[in-house]
Image (cartoon, grey):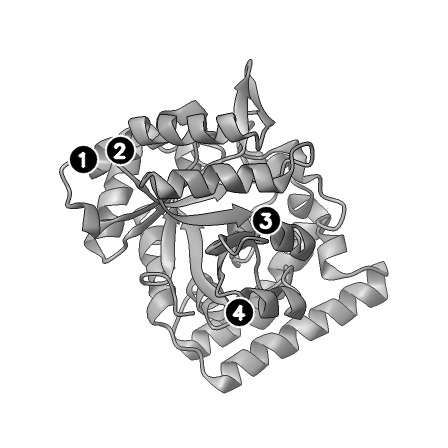
């Protein structure tokens, strides 16, 4: 399967202010800059600021020709007081879609996604709702997110899944060869998110103290001081020289690397500044040489060996990702 659109989408979660605060005027300017530079794909969710980001994105796109942009939004959470709870129930999925369409001011959603598996509901019920929305013309393509290979197979029993969105980066090798082969065999495009690990894959020397109170990263295991200090040191020592040789930033390198992995059709990237928008899109045109790819792989293998020797665990376990509770919710308003 070919890449989806130009390979980099604008993730709008940062506009809900989980990281560096972004005013609405700044967010609108970033959306405009992304479009001006050839960007087309926007990823949003009704859980981002309780629907306010969908409404803002709708205002930003109003008046534009529908073929100029591509929208992905999701279902899977329902409002529960000051937070959300997981739900893949048929009626909740359909209601979520209708409410998102109203907030966005659109007649259809390009990709409609099950944000998270609901273990209490048969996946077939969720898929029936998604398929019915597609038949009604409200949805063009169906996706699932944050799934294992077993869960993906269950969702796709009827062959209705078009895309799968999972977290993936050059230090978070979360996609097995079996997962990638299944997607290839079933013509399912893989959308990768957190490709630069919320800024962890940059040479920045920021520690936890540099993040404001309320910044999401302050409570994420991969940003614990010993973890991010070691990973950022590795980025500066092992990855930044490869980026320099390739004439790119580390961010663009990480995006280009992901796009050159089997099965990946899109990287979904957030941004809080114009420079980040430009840097993200630069990853699309960066064609890494075989030598650069080999150097990146050698650096990753060496890091894995070093962490195994010193900590006795894998890189993912060192980052706290093996035991991470997906249902703790980083985008659920809690």
- Residue placed most toward the observer, 91 or 112: 91
Which one is closest to the eye, mark 4 or mark 2?
Answer: 4
Q: Label 4 crowding class (10 Å Cα cut-off): few <14, some 14-19, many 20+?
A: some
Q: Specify which label sits upstream in the sequence, 1 or 3.
A: 1
Q: Which x, y percent locates residue 180?
A: 59, 67
Residue at image position (61%, 44%) is: 207
> From mark 2 to mark 3, how far is it between C-alphas?
29 Å
> Can you see residue 23?
no
> From mark 4 to mark 2, how far is it between C-alphas?
33 Å
Does the CB distance between marks 1 and 3 fall below 8 Å?
A: no
Q: Which x, y percent locates residue 252?
A: 42, 64
> From mark 2 to mark 1, how far is it between C-alphas?
6 Å
What residue did someone put label 4 on? 184
Which one is closest to the eye, mark 4 or mark 1?
Answer: 4
> From mark 1 to mark 3, how far is it between C-alphas?
34 Å
Q: Secondary structure at mark 1?
A: loop
Residue at image position (63%, 55%) is: 153
What residue did someone put label 1 on? 62
Residue at image position (54%, 29%) is: 77
Residue farthest along the bottom direction in this orientation: 291
What residue did someone put label 2 on? 58
Q: Secondary structure at mark 3?
A: helix
Does the CB distance between marks 3 and 4 fall below 8 Å?
A: no
Q: Secondary structure at mark 4?
A: helix
Q: Is residue 315 above or below residue 89?
A: below
> From mark 4 to mark 1, how far is it between C-alphas?
36 Å
């Amino acid at each position: 399967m070919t890449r989806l659109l130009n390979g980099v989408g604008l993730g709008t979660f940062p506009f809900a202010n989980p990281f560096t605060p972004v005013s609405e005027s700044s967010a609108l300017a970033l959306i405009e800059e992304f479009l001006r530079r050839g960007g087309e794909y926007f990823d949003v969710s009704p859980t981002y600021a309780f629907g306010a980001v969908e409404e803002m994105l709708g205002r930003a796109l109003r008046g534009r020709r529908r073929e100029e942009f591509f929208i992905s939004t999701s279902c899977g959470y329902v409002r529960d007081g000051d937070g959300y709870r997981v739900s893949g129930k048929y009626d909740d999925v359909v209601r979520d879609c209708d409410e998102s369409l109203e907030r966005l001011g659109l007649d259809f959603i390009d990709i409609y996604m099950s944000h998270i598996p609901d273990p209490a509901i048969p996946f077939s019920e969720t898929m029936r709702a998604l398929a019915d929305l597609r038949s009604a013309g409200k949805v063009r393509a169906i996706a699932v997110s944050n799934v294992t290979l077993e869960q993906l197979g269950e969702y796709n029993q009827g062959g209705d899944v078009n895309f799968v969105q999972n977290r993936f980066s050059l230090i978070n090798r979360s996609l097995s060869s079996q997962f990638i082969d299944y997607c290839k065999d079933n013509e399912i495009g893989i959308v990768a998110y957190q490709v630069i690990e919320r800024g962890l894959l940059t040479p920045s020397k920021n520690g936890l103290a540099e993040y404001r109170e309320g910044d999401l990263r302050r409570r994420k295991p991969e940003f614990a001081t010993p973890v991010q200090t070691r990973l950022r040191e590795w980025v500066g020592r092992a990855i930044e020289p490869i980026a320099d040789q390739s004439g790119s930033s580390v961010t663009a390198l990480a995006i280009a690397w992901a796009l050159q992995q089997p099965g990946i059709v899109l990287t979904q990237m957030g941004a809080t500044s114009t420079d980040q928008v430009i840097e993200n899109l630069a990853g699309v045109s960066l064609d890494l040489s075989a030598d650069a790819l080999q150097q990146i792989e050698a650096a990753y293998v060496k890091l894995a060996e070093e962490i195994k020797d010193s900590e006795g665990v894998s890189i993912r376990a060192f980052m706290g990702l093996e035991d991470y509770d997906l249902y703790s919710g980083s985008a659920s308003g809690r």
